Structures are given as structure tokens and as C-alpha cells.
Amino acid sequence: MLEFPRWKYFLILIILAVSALYALPNVYQKDPSVQITANRGAALDDALRSRVAADLAQQGVQVKGVALEGGSLMVRLHDLDAQTRAADVLRGDLGENYTVALNLASTVPDWLDNLGAQPMVLGLDLQGGVHFVLQVDQPAALEKRMDAYVEEVRVTLRDNRIGYQSVERRRDHSIVATLSPSNDAEAIAKARKLLTTAQPTLTQTLSGHQLTLQVPESELAQIATGAIEQNITTLRNRVNELGVSEPIIQRQGNDRVVVQLPGVQDTAAAKRMIGATATLEYRAVVEGNAADALATGRIPPEAKVYYRRDSGEPILLNKRVIVTGDQMVGAQSTMDQNGQPAVSVTLNSVGGQRMFDFTSVSVNKPMAVVYVEYLPEVKIVDGKEVHSTRVKEEVISVANINGVFGKQFQTTGLAKPEADELARQLKSGSLAAPMTFIEERIVGPSLGKENVERGVTAVLYAFLFTLIFFTVYYRMFGVLTSMALLFNLLIVVAVMSLFEATMTLPGFAGLALSIGLSVDANVLINERIREELRAGVPPKAAIVAGYEKAGGTILDANLTAIIAGVALYAFGTGPLKGFAVTLIVGVLASMFTAITVSRALAVLVYSRRKKLKSLAI
């Protein structure tokens, strides 16, 4: 009567072994460390490693190790105070050629790492991280959009062969197109109709041959709002490229964005990736001597002077952009045929068509690639901080067009780290407007350590109290229940680690609650067995009846908890999601351990006793 299938024992043993394996990395604490990454042209080699070790030894900073790990030099320290001292020393010694940042280095053995076993990911409130507040430069977004309007008006008139003298932008967010006097009334009417079709949101006013297009206030507000929304979307994509778990990215007020990155201590890399506004522009080269044009001031009206990155020499490029980074849908860092770093670019349909049209009529003519970067600046004016943005434009490549191409091609002229970073930025999308870091806070790992210790202590005391209560009150079945609860905790930790779910401080509350629900399930089973015994049912039959009759009740009770957890995860944010994840995983594990594991243990203990007259319950 008291039987349990052998295959279920094998299943339990397999789950126990896998859970122990993937929970094991949480035993290995991370080392406080200092991460050194090279800027353009600098080298990471044994000479640098020896220099770093010597500098730290001279300053009396004891290190656990200095080694090259994953493309950076990692200095492992014994404690947080040594980490801070080492960072200060190295920032002063290494200068601008290297970026020095705080980090936490993994100590998980290679054999576990090769199996994909990693420690549980901790949230910002547990392991620390960075908290940024960024201000979106909305005037820059308006400027960028107005420039696009001006270019679109020029293209519309030029493509339809309507003569014009100039198209200019005014400070009141209007565009004035001065048409050629040779245009008659029919041509002017045609121009107005074409511009209405191309720009339906702009209002038109005609005075002689001067056509004024006004951007309405509602459109200006939409541009400003859209800039923030696009920046938030781009930030989420960029944070995904950083591989940060459970980041918080949300709007604050009219022009600010809050970014929280748990576990990130390399603030330099985070700021470079988040705030970078680098992009590419492809422009045609205008014939002529740029140096003579600068000297005489006679720059062709369709041209603009740029400077080469490698030599610093001036070059004339067409004001009209062929395609920009906004039209790129894919980018990948690669190598060209000569083994040099390159970025393989894929354009959208509009950009691909424009590139195809240009290259079709420009074979054997040069085309330039311009690297555009928006650099935030802070100046003190009358005792107040004034944030502004400086545009840096460099020609990184000028090459002849050897054949016709459209959507896919390669861009060269970049260093390897620069190509990698630019590819990530282009793939995640460009920012609609530059952003300035106006607040930066580092949540120290000491605070996280205290939170972890308190959370672990709370769960531990709740767990120990439960084990003692069960052992005293239910005796042998209390011991079996305690073993099932330990298995339950092991499964939760393993699942959270395996799927890289983030454990937050509210997550500890969810874990404690799931243990409580597991206790509740075991109480239902034990009390049901006691009821069967009081009714005069034989011990073995009472065990079977207890598990079978309590199973449906346990399923119903836990199902409602899972539904509540799913709702919290679907509609909640931040801490609520952390609570919901641990609750759902804990409830599912408790159902398995309470119904299956504890029954397997009970059968293992009592099935071979033929003359069983009573149960220790």
C-alpha cells in the first residue's frame, strides 16, 4: 500500500544534484577589485602589470593578485578600504591613458563557470551599483529636428525642379524659403502643394516669393516629449548591451531620466555607454582645395569644411548627408580584408535606397565617413552651473566608391575598442538629444553587505524557528518536513542563480513568504495524517490518505499565490518584481517538495516496516 515509484526517486536525486551544483557558486564571495581598461593607443601587457604591482607595493597597498582578465587588467584586493586606496593610487599614476574603475571580481572556479553556474544576481539595494540622473538637452533635439525640416524643404524643391534662392531657419522655429523670381504663380502654387504633402503639420504663409513655414507649438512639444521617450528606449537597449540585470530606467519630470544599474561599479564604462551620442554620417566629397578655401574664405555654398582624424588636414564635404546613424538597423564590429577593425553596417530601406541612388551615379568618386560625437560641457556662469553640448566632427575615412551598394557595407578607420563601442551604440540606436549627467551616486557595497546580512539573518531565523517547531511538534514527520524545506530553499537559490534572476531586499521577503507557504502545505499534510489516525485508519493507509487528500487543497492555495505573484510581476516595477519572482519560484518549489519529496522520504522510512502500529506524528 505504501509505495513510491523508483523513477520519482531518480528524478528527486537528479534535481537535488543539479540544484546543489547551481547553488554552489553563491558560496564564493566576490573580490573587491580595481579594473583597468586601456584608452586608444594604450597597451595592456606584462609591463603594465608589473608597474601597477610595484606602484601599489610602494604605497603599502597589499593585493591578492594582478592579472589580465577579459581584455582588462584586474587588481584583486583583500577588502573595500584597500580597493579605494588602490583606485586613488592608480588614477594618479596611470593618467588619462587608462580608465580606472571599481569592480567586483568573480571567484567562481573555472569548472563551475564552464558549466554556466554563476552566483545569484543581487539588486542595487543588496550589492550596490550606480544611480544616475540625466538631463535631456531638449533645445538640441529641437535644433536637430529643425535642421531636418530645412533639409527636407530643400530636397523637396530641388527634386521637383522648383528654383529657390535660399532656405533658412529663424529663431522663432520657422523656415523661410525664398523662391526664385523666375517662378510664376503656377510654380509657386505647386511648391506650396508639394510642401504641404511633405510637411502636413507646418503652417504656410506666402509673401511675394517668400514662403514661410511655421512649426506649431503642439509639434514643438511633441518633438521635446518624443526626444525623451526615444532616449529612454535607446538607454534600455544600451543597458541590455551592458548585460545589467533588472535595471531601472524611468522618466523624472519634464526633461530628466533616472538610471539605476545594480552591480555596476565600472562607472566610467557605464557613463561612456549610456551617455554616448556618437554616430556616423556619410557625405560626398566636394572637389577643390580645402586649405585654399579656408585661406581665401571662398567656401563653395554647398560645402562645409571638416578635418581628417589621422592627419588633421581640412577637407570639403557636401552639406547634404547621404545617410546617418539614425537610418542604421544593424551594426557589428568585424575585420576588413586587410585585417583592420571595421564596423559592418546594415541600413533600413530608406537609407539603403538613398545609398544605392548615390553610389549608382558616384562610382570611382570619393565618399567620406564622418564620426560625430556630442560632448557635454559644464561651465560656471554667475556662480551657477550651465550645461551645454559641444559637437566634435572628424573624418575617419575617405575612400573611392568601387561599385554600387545599398543596405550593407563596411566602415573602416577606427581602432578596435572604438569599433566595438560604436557598433554597440549604432545597434542600440542613437539618442534623439544629448544628455548630461547631473547626478551620480554610487551605492557602496558596504551598504549592500549590511542589507544582505540582515536579509539572510531574517530568512535564517524564520527557517530555524520553523525547523525547531516542526521537529518538536511533529517528531519524525517534523524531521522529514524539515529536510523537504531545506531542499526547497536549495531549489529556489539554484533556480534564481541559473536563470540570472535578480534577488532584491523585497525578494528576501518573498523568499520568507514562500517558506511560510511551504510550511502551510506540510502542516495540511501532517494534520490530515493525524486525522486519519484518530479515525482508526492503519498508519500506512493514513500516510497515503493524508498526502492524497491534502494535495488538492495545497494545489488550490498555492495556485492563488502564483496568480498573485504573476500579477505583481506583470504590473509592478522594480522591488515588486523582485518580490514576485522569488514568491513564484518559492511557491512552485514548495509544491514539489511538500507533495513529492516529503512523501518520498516518508515512504523510504516507513514502507519496509511490516508491523507498523503507530506513527511519530
Image (spheres, helix red, strand yellow):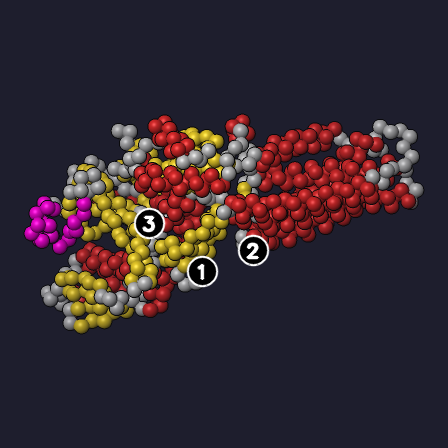
In this rendering, would 440 be left or right of 485? left
Residue 74 shows up from this direction? no
Q: Which quadrant is home to the C terminus?
A: top right
In this rendering, would 182 be left or right of 488? left
Q: Are marks 2 and 1 in contact (CB under 8 Å)?
A: no
- Crowd tier of the residue under label 1, counting other residues whose Cα lies within 10 Å: few below 14, some 14–19, many 20 or above: few
Residue 538 shows up from this direction? yes
Going 81% across and 38% down the picture, which residue do you hit? 477
In this rendering, would 180 be left or right of 436? left
Q: Which residues are magenta?
A: 288-307
Going 49% across and 41% down the picture, which residue do you hit? 80
Going 49% across and 47% down the picture, which residue do you hit? 444
Q: Position of residue 53 (x, y in %)?
A: 40, 31
Can you tell which quarter of the image residue 407 is in? top left
Earlier sequence position, callout 2 versus callout 1 = 1
Q: Is residue 292 above or below residue 386?
A: above
In this rendering, would 308 be left or right of 128? left
Amino acid, disc 1: Gln
Give the label, 3 or 2, closer to the camera: 3
Earlier sequence position, callout 3 versus callout 1 = 1
Q: Position of residue 276 (x, y in %)?
A: 35, 48
Can you tell which quarter of the image residue 494 is in? top right
**Which residue position holds label 2?**
571
Distance from the alpha carbon under mark 2 to that under mark 1: 19 Å
Earlier sequence position, callout 3 versus callout 2 = 3
- Crowd tier of the residue under label 3, counting other residues whose Cα lies within 10 Å: few below 14, some 14–19, many 20 or above: many
Residue 567 highlighted magenta (yes or no): no
Q: Position of residue 173 (x, y in %)?
A: 27, 66
Residue 302 highlighted magenta (yes or no): yes
Going 91% across and 30% down the picture, which residue do you hit? 611
**Which residue position holds label 3?**
277
